[in-house]
Amino acid sequence: MNGETRKIVRLALIVGLAAGATACANPFKTAQVDPSSSIAAEAAAAAKAKAPRRKFSDIPALPNDVPTADQVRAAVVQQQRAGEALAAAVAPNTWELKDTDAYVNKARRDVKAPAFEAPTDADRADTAAFARAARGRASAPPSQP
C-alpha cells in the first residue's frame, strides 16, 4: 500500500513540475494582447519599445534619518503615558469647585436687574389694539383636499 502511495505522489510531482515548467518556459516572452481591447495597439507598441534597462545603481541609498526601533518604541511609550495621564486628569470626580465667591460677586455686580413694572392702562390698551389688528390681518388657512 505504501509503495503505491509513493508511486502516486511521485507521479503527481512529476506532472506538476512538468506543467509548471511549461507554464514558465519563457518568462521573457512578450505577453499576448487582447485584440478587442481599446488600447491593444498602444499596449503592443509599449511592449515592443526598447527602453534603457534599470541598474542596481539606480536604487537610492538608504535614508539616514529613519528612527531606530528603540526610538520608535520610546516615542510610542511616551505617547501612551501622556494619554493615560490625560485620561486620569479628565476622569469623573477628579476635580472640585473652589473659591467661587469672587466669580459670584463679580457676576452679581455685572448683572442689571430687569425693571419689573406693573402694566398701566395705556400698556393694556396698546396690547389690546395690537391683538385686534393682528386678528384683522389673519386669514384662515386653506383647506386640505
Image (cartoon, grey):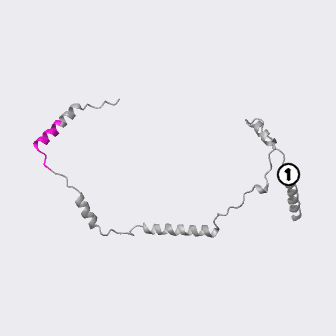
In the picture, residue 64 is in which quadrant?
bottom right
Figure check: 9 above or below 70: above
Is 119 within the magenta? Answer: yes
Relative to 39, is 83 on the left or the right? left
Q: Where's the N terminus, which quadrant?
A: bottom right
Amino acid carrying label 1: it is Ala
Q: Residue at x 24, y 64 (%)?
A: 105
Circle count? 1
Location of residue 14 in the rendering, given as x and y in whole percent from the top left corner: 88, 56
Q: Residue at x 21, y 31 (%)?
A: 136
Q: Residue at x 85, y 56 (%)?
A: 12
Q: Residue at x 74, y 37 (%)?
A: 39
Relative to 59, is 128 on the left or the right? left
Helix, strand or loop for disc 1: helix
Relative to 140, is 37 on the left or the right? right
Q: Nearer the viewer, residue 28 or 2?
A: 28
Location of residue 113 in the rendering, given as x and y in whole percent from the top left corner: 20, 55
Location of residue 71 in the rendering, given as x and y in whole percent from the top left corner: 61, 69
Residue at the farthest left position: 121
Figure check: 74 above or below 136: below
Q: Main secondary structure of the magenta part?
A: helix
Q: Which residues are magenta?
A: 117-129
Report crowding for label 1: few under 14, some 14 to 19, many 20 or more residues within 10 A (C-alpha).
few
Query: Which residue is tagged 1?
Result: 19
Q: Where's the C terminus, which quadrant?
A: top left
Location of residue 13 in the rendering, given as x and y in whole percent from the top left corner: 86, 58
Is 72 within the magenta? Answer: no
Relative to 50, is 144 on the left or the right? left
Q: Nearer the viewer, residue 101 or 96?
A: 101
